[in-house]
Image: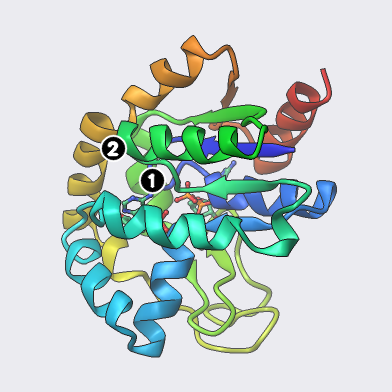
C-alpha cells in the first residue's frame, strides 16, 4: 500500500504516519526527517536544506525529489510506504506519479489531515522533538512521562527552530500557496480521503484505518 499524508505543517501527519507504518508494516518516510538527519550529520545536503528550512521555505524540488526517489528505491519499500511531507508541490507529485507508473504501480491513497490554521499555531508551539531519536511530543496533548525528557532515549527535548511562531506563519503561507493545490490534484485522481485532524489522535487514527479498509 502506498500512502501520502497531506495537511498543513503541524496537522499531525507525522503522528499518524507513524501509526499507519506500524499497523501495516510499511516504512514511514519523512523528507523533513531525512533533511534533519543530514543537518545533524553536517552533510552537504543538510547544509543546503537548512538554509531553506530555517526560513520556513521549501527545499527546492530538484534536491527533494532526488532524496525521495533514492529512499523509495530501497528494498524495504517493495510492499509500499507512507510518505509524510512529500509531495509538497505539484511538480513533486508529478515526478512521483511518473516514477511509480514506471514500476506499473500507483499511489493508493492521499490522506488529508484537515486542521484549521487557528489550531496549527498551538500545535506547533507545543511540539517538542527528541534530537536523539526524532520522537515527537506535545507539551499538552502528548506529554513525555518526565517533563522535557524523551521517554525512549532519555535525551532533552527541544523546540524545532522552524516551530518558532515567526517561522510557523511563513510555513503556513507556503503551505497554502504551494502545497494545498495537491488536494485538488489527488481529488481529481479519486484517491483523496479527508479526515478531521482536530480530533484526539486515536480518533484520527481510527478514522484513517476505516478509510484505508473501506
Ligand atoms: P506534522 O507531521 O503534520 O508536522 P506532527 O505529527 O508532528 O505534525 O504533530 C504536530 C504536533 O501536534 C505534535 O506536537 C503532536 O504531538 C501534536 N498532535 C498530533 N496529532 C494531534 C492531535 N490529534 N491532537 C492534538 N495534538 C496532536
Ligand atoms: P516537516 O518535518 O515535514 O515539517 O518539514 C520541515 C521542513 O523541511 C519544511 O518546512 C521544508 O523546509 C523542508 N521539507 C520537507 N519536506 C519537503 C518537501 N517535500 N519539499 C520541500 N521542502 C521540504
- Residue occupying the point 39% across, 85% down: 40
Residue 32 on image: x %, y %: 42, 61
- Residue occupying the point 37% across, 71% down: 159
- Is residue 150 visible in the rendered image? The answer is yes
Relative to 54, say whether 175 is above or below: above
Mark 2: secondary structure:
helix
Location of residue 150 by image quarter: bottom right
Residue 108 on image: x %, y %: 67, 28
Q: Which quadrant of the figure shows ligand 2?
A: bottom left
- Residue occupying the point 17% across, 69% down: 51
At label 1, counting other C-alpha atoms closer than 10 Å, the crowd grade (few under 14, some 14-19, many 20 or more) is many
Mark 1: secondary structure:
loop
Relative to 175, say whether 27 is above or below: below
Relative to 86, say whether 93 is above or below: above
Q: Which residue is the site of mark 1?
A: 9
Query: Which of 2 and 28 lies nearest the eye of the viewer?
Result: 2
Instruction: Report if the beta carbon of the residue with label 1 is closer than 8 angstroms to ligand 1.
Output: yes
Query: Which of 95 and 176 lies nearest the eye of the viewer?
Result: 95
User: Is 8 on the left-hand or right-hand side of 162?
Assistant: right
Relative to 213, say whether 7 is above or below: below
At label 2, counting other C-alpha atoms closer than 10 Å, the crowd grade (few under 14, some 14-19, many 20 or more) is many
Residue 43 on image: x %, y %: 34, 85
Residue 175 — which label? 2
Residue 91 on image: x %, y %: 31, 35
User: Is 133 on the left-hand or right-hand side of 172?
Assistant: right
Instruction: Report if the beta carbon of the residue with label 2 is closer than 8 angstroms to ligand 2.
Output: no
Q: Are marks 2 and 1 in contact (CB under 8 Å)?
A: yes
- Residue occupying the point 59% across, 55% down: 72
Amino acid at each position: 500500500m502506498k500512502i501520502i499524508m497531506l495537511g498543513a505543517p503541524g496537522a499531525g501527519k507525522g503522528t499518524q504516519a507513524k501509526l499507519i507504518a506500524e499497523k501495516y508494516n510499511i516504512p514511514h518516510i519523512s523528507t523533513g526527517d531525512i533533511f534533519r538527519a543530514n543537518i545533524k550529520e553536517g552533510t552537504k545536503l543538510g547544509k543546503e536544506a537548512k538554509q531553506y528550512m530555517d526560513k520556513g521555505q521549501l527545499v527546492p524540488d530538484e534536491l527533494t525529489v532526488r532524496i525521495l526517489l533514492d529512499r523509495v528505491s530501497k528494498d524495504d519499500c517493495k510492499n509500499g510506504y507512507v510518505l509524510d511531507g512529500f509531495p509538497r508541490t505539484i511538480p513533486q507529485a508529478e515526478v512521483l506519479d511518473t516514477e511509480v507508473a514506471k514500476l506499473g504501480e500507483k499511489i493508493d491513497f492521499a490522506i488529508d489531515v484537515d486542521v484549521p490554521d487557528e489550531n496549527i499555531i498551538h500545535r506547533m508551539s507545543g511540539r517538542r522533538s527528541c534530537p536523539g531519536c526524532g520522537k515527537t511530543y506535545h507539551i499538552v496533548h502528548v506529554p513525555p512521562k518526565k517533563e522535557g525528557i524523551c521517554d525512549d532515549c532519555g535525551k532533552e527535548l527541544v523546540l524545532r527552530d522552524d516551530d518558532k511562531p515567526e517561522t510557523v506563519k511563513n510555513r503556513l503561507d507556503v503551505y497554502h500557496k504551494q502545497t494545498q493545490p495537491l488536494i485538488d490534484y489527488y481529488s481529481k485522481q479519486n484517491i483523496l480521503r479527508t479526515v478531521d485532524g482536530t480530533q484526539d489522535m486515536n480518533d484520527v487514527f481510527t478514522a484513517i484505518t476505516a478509510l484505508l479498509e473501506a
